[in-house]
Image (cartoon, rainbow, N blue to C red):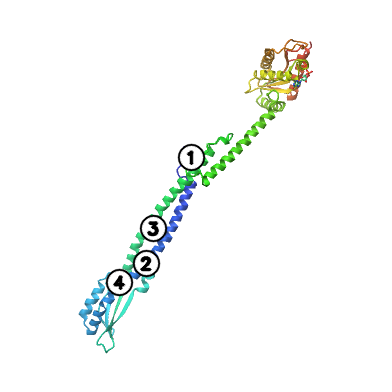
Amino acid sequence: MNKASLPLRSGSLTSKQALLTMLLAILISVIAGSMELFNHASSMRQSVAQRVEQQLAIVKGAAAEAAFQLNPDLAHQIAYGLFSDNEIAEVVILDDFGSPLAGFAPTEAVETSWLSQRLFGDMLYYQIPLNYYVAADLPEAEVGKVELRLDEQRLTQQFLDRSISVVGSSVVEAFILSLLIIAFFHYFITRPLLKVHDAIAHADPERPGEWDKPRLRGHRHDELGHLVDSLDHLLQAFQQGLDQRDQLHHLSHIDGLTGVANRRHFDLFYQQQWKRARRRAEPFSVIFIDIDNFKEFNDHYGHAMGDDTLRAVAQVLNNCIDPAHDLLARYGGEEFVCVLPNKDEEAALEVAQRLRQAVLSLAIPHAYSSTHTHLTASMGVASTPAQTTISPAALLAQADQHLYHAKHLGRNRVETRPRTA
Ligand SMILES: Nc1nc2c(ncn2[C@@H]2O[C@H](COP(=O)(O)OP(=O)(O)OP(=O)(O)O)[C@@H](O)[C@H]2O)c(=O)[nH]1
């Protein structure tokens, strides 16, 4: 599955973004909702007060007339008119002695609450004097008053009904907005980042420079584009370092003249394979190979020709071994060594004969050899069985000794035991 299209996982950048955005949206919606409720409460208070004052202003004249005439019917009519308003819980019209002319009160006691007191507690009671105009030259006389009390329960209920819709719509708005923000950040930031992560995760650690550099559409010149470019530079530099390491490793293990493994490589390989053979209780063989009469060859054909010949011999020998298991190395000068892990004496002798034949098959003339007409090589083979107490150095010494015998017995031969001519 393409990691860039992974669904939301807990702990992922997208889920963290989603959580943070949601929390932020809730916080913003709480603050915005509270502000809106506060505004709503003050505008409701204002409009209620305005309405009540308007109503009182309308009935004020008629109520004064009723109080002046001590007319309970008229007062009753006026009080009833005021009481019909849903927001008014109680109304009383009093004469100038304070005796009620008319009044209406709820049949049940009006419940009060902390919220209704906080919202409307300071504006529940109204009292206006009723002044009566008698004549232009006489002052207005106070003939009574109107008292009324607002229905705090109803007002609070109205406020709550409106609040639910205000808070509800603010939460829905915040939710939709946060979803849009989450989708935006996911598609424009998190997804490209996942693509970069995916490309790095799939890069071959041995060939980091060949990583599949992501193409982020719309991000070429922004921070994400720069991040990809920087990563690319870093991986290219890393690749160069690896190439140099490989090159150095190659150079430090390869013989410069012949191209086969050098003495250092041989030493490491020999020790490593020796331990392995002992661990696994396997046989182990080694062959020393020495070109015959090479001094004469050099002396007569020249050093350059000698170098070419060394290269040709090294290559032909190398082609005779199994590179997956065995190793051919230049031991020094015109001497080579072949390591044969997990091969007993019989198998090693076969290989040695093959190597000897391979040198012969080059058919390089050697007119100045004291023993043959063409270039030849002598070999000394030493082997250990699966169980042995011999040391690795002693095995090498044996092979060297057997080579000496091969030389002594006339060259161009393979020897595996010391014997006399
Ligand atoms: N051209 C060339 N010659 C080398 C190189 N390394 C060693 N030699 C020569 O190999 C020759 C080895 O000579 P000797 O050790 O006497 O052995 P040999 O003449 O092969 O005689 P036997 O080993 O007894 O058959 C010397 O003349 C070295 O100069 C090399 O890298 N290039």
Q: Are marks 2 and 3 in contact (CB under 8 Å)?
A: no
Q: Amino acid at mark 1?
A: Lys
Above or below 340: residue 49: below
Classify residue 254 as left or right of residue 76: right
- Label 3 – label 1 distance at C-alpha: 36 Å
In the rendered image, residue 103, in percent from the top left (x then y), is placed at 25, 77
For this view, does 198 lie left or right of residue 287?
Answer: left
Q: Which residue is identified by label 2?
A: 41
Of the image marks 4 and 3, the number of the one nearer the N terminus:
4
Label 1: which residue? 3
Disc 4 element: helix
Which residue is outermost to the bottom?
137
Spatial distance from mark 4 to mark 3, Cα to Cα? 29 Å
The relative height of residue 108 versus residue 325 in the rendered view (above or below) is below
Task: Determine the image quadrant of residue 287.
Answer: top right
Cα–Cα gap, marks 4 and 1:
65 Å
The type of residue carrying mark 2 is: Ala
Q: Secondary structure at mark 3?
A: helix
Spot occupied by residue 301 in the image (x, y as percentages of width and height): 75, 16
Graded by Cα atoms within 10 Å as few (under 14), some (14 to 19) or many (20 or more), the crowding at tag 3 reads many
| SS class, disc 2 | helix
Mark 4 lies on residue: 51
Q: Nearer the viewer, residue 320 or 70?
A: 320
Q: Which mark is residue 329?
A: none
Judging by the rendered image, the residue that carries numbered circle 3 is 170
Of the numbered discs 3 and 1, the one sitting upstream in the chain is 1
Q: Report the mark closest to the observer, 2 or 4.
A: 4
Please rate how many residues cluster around mark 4, counting C-alpha atoms within 10 Å: few if below 14, some from 14 to 19, many from 20.
Answer: few
Q: Is mark 1 within 8 Å of ligand 1?
A: no
